Image (cartoon, rainbow, N blue to C red):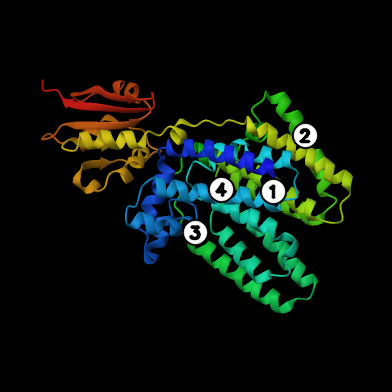
């Protein structure tokens, strides 16, 4: 590629993201994926995936590394980074966007700070969505290959499934319209396989351990504040973007179908099934990019519409450069530091009072060498009784709290227990030494 702007942007992106990547300690969701891949057996796939709510593609990719404990966490982090890097390269090479728009997308917070650094299933989903966008104009030349990509995209995450579903509808409609019945039958077979894999992976999903705030549904306030500005400005910008984009999308029925399908699916999912977090909500932005890509790939839209879409998407992407969503549990997990602390207390009895601390386990080669009691019910309050039942009188006991719940403990009858703070990590992770007081 001779585009100098591409090379300048991508080199800076590589430097920034790799520095962040090699200083990143995985948090619970990343560590869980590694643990699932390490324990992965096809005969117990439902038991492994029922707590995750994500699909098999990411876990299968991790299996060769997790099974043999190869270079955790860097193998996992680099694999994810490569997918995000490839997605951006496809966007730069094939997207009908100008350099300004591509640069703003590249340095937007989702691509610069989250999807490229935090090793989840989302980067591979974005790569496959962008690949579907890149092949969109030639989808009828290779409908089976296009369907296979849709299949794998649908099996990365429930969020990427919505985009895969929209692309699938467009493909099937075009095959039917053009009377390509043989290709239609093959693509419908792949679509049927996608439905079967979806049912298999979701039929036993466990929701009882979801935090209450994640089960109550997305609030209107969250929808009305997509940007980090005062609410009045957020609403003003949101109305302006909605009116502008809808005006443009009405010029291309397939772009309109795509954006309506994905947005309605996500709003329904976030409202009635899972509230979602900022990394899920960023897919509104990802699907906006895809819809604009579809629209600008059309030969039937006017130059004025192209200019309006370009201006609007540039504005949204520029705003997202400053869209910082900082979550200490994600970006500052200290999972490696917690693991080192656990190793220093290997002869003690460790009481884990929140599943977050399980993020340290992949750093420990063999957790069976440790005496650890785990209390994972995050929706139930911690009580003295819970702790007392776990204490071992013949060992030194340490209890691990996520955030400081010592005040809650102090308000209860201590039952002859003394809590002494042994380690405080960024005022979020607290480890107390427990001693039995003899009267």
Q: Nearer the viewer, mark 1 or mark 3?
A: 1
Counting residues from the start of the chain, the first of labels 2 and 1 encountered is: 1
- The local secondary structure at tag 1 comes to loop
**Residue position for label 3:** 57
Residue at x 49%, y 59% (from the top left corner): 57
The alpha-carbon separation of the residues under discs 1 and 3 comes to 34 Å
**Residue position for label 4:** 84
**Residue position for label 2:** 239
Q: Are marks 3 and 4 in contact (CB under 8 Å)?
A: no
- The local secondary structure at tag 4 comes to helix
Horizontal side of 300 relative to 156 (left or right) equals: right
The alpha-carbon separation of the residues under discs 2 and 1 comes to 38 Å
Residue at x 70%, y 46% (from the top left corner): 3
Of 323 and 388, the residue lying toward us: 323
**Residue position for label 1:** 2
Q: Are marks 2 and 1 in contact (CB under 8 Å)?
A: no
Counting residues from the start of the chain, the first of labels 3 and 4 encountered is: 3
């Amino acid at each position: 590629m001779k585009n100098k702007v591409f090379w300048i942007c991508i080199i800076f992106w590589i430097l920034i993201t790799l520095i962040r990547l090699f200083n990143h300690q995985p948090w619970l969701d990343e560590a869980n994926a590694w643990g699932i891949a390490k324990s992965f057996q096809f005969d117990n796939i439902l038991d492994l995936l029922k707590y995750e709510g994500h699909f098999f593609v990411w876990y299968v990719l991790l299996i060769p590394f997790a099974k043999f404990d190869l270079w955790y966490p860097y193998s996992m982090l680099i694999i994810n980074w490569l997918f995000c890097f490839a997605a951006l390269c496809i966007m730069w090479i094939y997207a009908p966007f100008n350099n300004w728009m591509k640069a703003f997308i590249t340095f937007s917070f989702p691509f610069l700070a989250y999807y490229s650094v935090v090793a989840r299933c989302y980067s591979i989903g974005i790569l496959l969505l962008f690949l579907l966008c890149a092949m969109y104009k030639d989808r009828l030349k290779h409908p089976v290959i296009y369907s296979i990509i849709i299949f794998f995209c649908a099996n990365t995450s429930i969020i990427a499934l919505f985009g895969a579903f929209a692309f699938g509808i467009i493909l099937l409609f075009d095959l039917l319209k053009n009377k390509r019945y043989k290709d239609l039958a093959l693509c419908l077979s792949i679509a049927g396989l996608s439905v079967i894999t979806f049912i298999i992976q979701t039929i036993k999903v466990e929701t009882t351990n979801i935090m209450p705030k994640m089960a109550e549904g997305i609030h209107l306030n969250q929808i009305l504040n997509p940007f980090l500005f005062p609410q009045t400005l957020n609403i003003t910008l949101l109305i302006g973007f909605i009116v502008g984009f809808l005006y443009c999308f009405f010029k291309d029925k397939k772009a309109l179908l795509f954006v309506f399908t994905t947005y309605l699916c996500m709003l329904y999912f976030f409202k009635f099934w899972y509230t979602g977090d900022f990394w899920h909500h960023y897919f509104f932005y990802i699907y906006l990019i895809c819809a604009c890509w579809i629209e600008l790939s059309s030969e039937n839209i006017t130059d004025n519409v192209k200019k309006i879409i370009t201006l609007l998407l540039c504005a949204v992407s520029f705003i997202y450069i400053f869209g910082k969503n900082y979550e200490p549990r994600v970006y500052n997990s200290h999972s490696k530091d917690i693991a080192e602390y656990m190793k220093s207390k290997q002869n003690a009895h460790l009481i884990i009072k929140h599943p977050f601390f399980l993020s340290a386990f992949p750093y420990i080669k063999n957790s069976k060498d440790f005496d650890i009691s785990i209390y994972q019910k995050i929706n139930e309050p911690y009580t003295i009784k819970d702790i007392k039942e776990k204490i071992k009188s013949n060992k030194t006991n340490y209890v691990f709290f996520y955030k400081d719940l010592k005040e809650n403990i102090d308000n209860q009858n201590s039952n002859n227990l003394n809590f002494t703070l042994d380690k405080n990590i960024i005022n979020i992770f607290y480890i107390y030494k427990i001693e039995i007081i003899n009267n």
